[in-house]
Amino acid sequence: MGWVKGEVRELKRWTERLFSLRVDADVEPFKAGQYNRLRLFVGEEWVARPYSYVNPPDVRPLEFHLVAVPEGPLTSRLMHMEPGDAVELMPRSTGLFTLDQLPDARDLWLLATGTGLGPFLSILGTDEPWRRFENIRLVHSVRHGAELSYRDRIREYARRAPERFHYQPLVTRERLEGTAQTRISVAMQDGQLEALCGLGIDAVHSQVMICGNPDMVRDTQAVLKGRGMQRNRRGHPGQITVENYW
Ligand SMILES: Cc1cc2nc3c(=O)[nH]c(=O)nc-3n(C[C@H](O)[C@H](O)[C@H](O)COP(=O)(O)OP(=O)(O)OC[C@H]3O[C@@H](n4cnc5c(N)ncnc54)[C@H](O)[C@@H]3O)c2cc1C
Ligand SMILES: NC(=O)c1ccc[n+]([C@@H]2O[C@H](COP(=O)([O-])OP(=O)(O)OC[C@H]3O[C@@H](n4cnc5c(N)ncnc54)[C@H](OP(=O)(O)O)[C@@H]3O)[C@@H](O)[C@H]2O)c1
């Protein structure tokens, strides 16, 4: 399949390593929670990697939230892009980390580490979660407070239903007021997460989406499975839907 030419509109830097790219490109319609691929010619070959959309499907430009990983062949280039620079994308987006994969339930939990926040921002920017779920909880775990990105946008989305929404930042490697110093999986195990969020998690009422670090995804799933929850699979509805970033 051919690639589509994109043009960088803006690079926003959150920290030295954490950034967001806004890109103009003519891609086919996609669903909130899906991802595209970004491709650059590096050295003597094309390097392409998947990236989740941050923008809701009806909003342009396209937006991606990235972290430059040490010696990462693609991110070490993308982090230095400037307005007007070229990057290629796939015409068609993919991925099943979308709300249409989830059965109805009362509560929606969105659990992210690092840039795993991205697809949840796209989802929260659509009507569907607010229409389908009574309570929504967004949990963002980062190492340092400066990595708590997109707080303004989260505040903006929360205005749709402040009494039904709660955002819980977790900062694991420093003590910071207004945040808890714990991991998602640990706080899930010891009940702190539910206490902080003012809502219980159980197989009857909760749908849980988990995105980011695969170790976090594994550890958090293990806790949920211990509570009788199962992965959502085609033909076998459960309560857990995951996206591993590596
Ligand atoms: C479905 C899907 C969606 C993705 N969406 C995003 C996204 O929206 N934003 C994003 O930054 N990355 C995302 N990734 C990861 C991304 O595709 C690349 O792997 C990453 O940008 C590193 O690329 P690289 O070529 O620089 O280094 P690579 O050689 O590809 O990665 C080197 C190592 O860096 C670590 N790593 C990779 N990605 C991350 C990350 N996001 N956070 C922390 N550590 C990481 C892992 O240990 C990995 O083995 C996604 C991956 C998948 C599978
Ligand atoms: N963030 C930095 O300051 C920094 C600096 C230099 C290099 N890097 C490198 O950059 C890349 C991305 O780093 P990142 O900080 O964005 O992503 P990350 O390492 O995935 O950390 C993001 C969050 O996930 C948590 N986490 C990790 N493993 C977990 C598990 N098994 N269960 C529950 N939670 C878990 C972390 O908690 P913990 O803090 O408890 O692990 C942290 O709160 C990595 O390759 C890293 O080595 C990061």
Image (tube, rainbow, N blue to C red):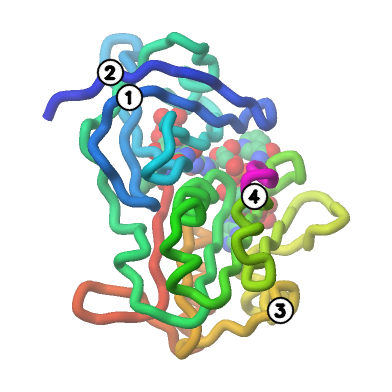
Residue holding disc 3: 198
Asked if the residues shown at circle 2 and circle 1 are in contact, with their CB atoms under 8 angstroms apart, the answer is yes
Mark linked to residue 156: 4
* First in residue order: circle 2 vs circle 3: 2
Mark 2 secondary-structure assignment: strand
Circle 1: residue type: Ala
Write the residue at 24% across / 31% down: 90
Q: Looking at this rendering, what residue extends furthest in the left direction?
A: 1
Residue holding disc 2: 5
Circle 3: residue type: Gly
- Residue 165, percent from left and from top: 63, 67
In this rendering, would 40 be left or right of 12? left
Write the residue at 42% across / 24% down: 23
Residue in front for this viewpoint, 208 or 69: 208
Write the residue at 49% across / 82% down: 106
Residue holding disc 1: 25
Q: CA distance from mark 3 to mark 4?
A: 21 Å
In this rendering, would 11 be left or right of 211? right
- Residue 226, percent from left and from top: 50, 85
* First in residue order: circle 3 vs circle 4: 4
Above or below residue 98? Residue 55 is above
Mark 1 secondary-structure assignment: loop
- Residue 212, percent from left and from top: 49, 52
Q: CA distance from mark 1 to mark 3?
A: 41 Å
Q: State yes or no: residue 153 in magenta.
A: yes
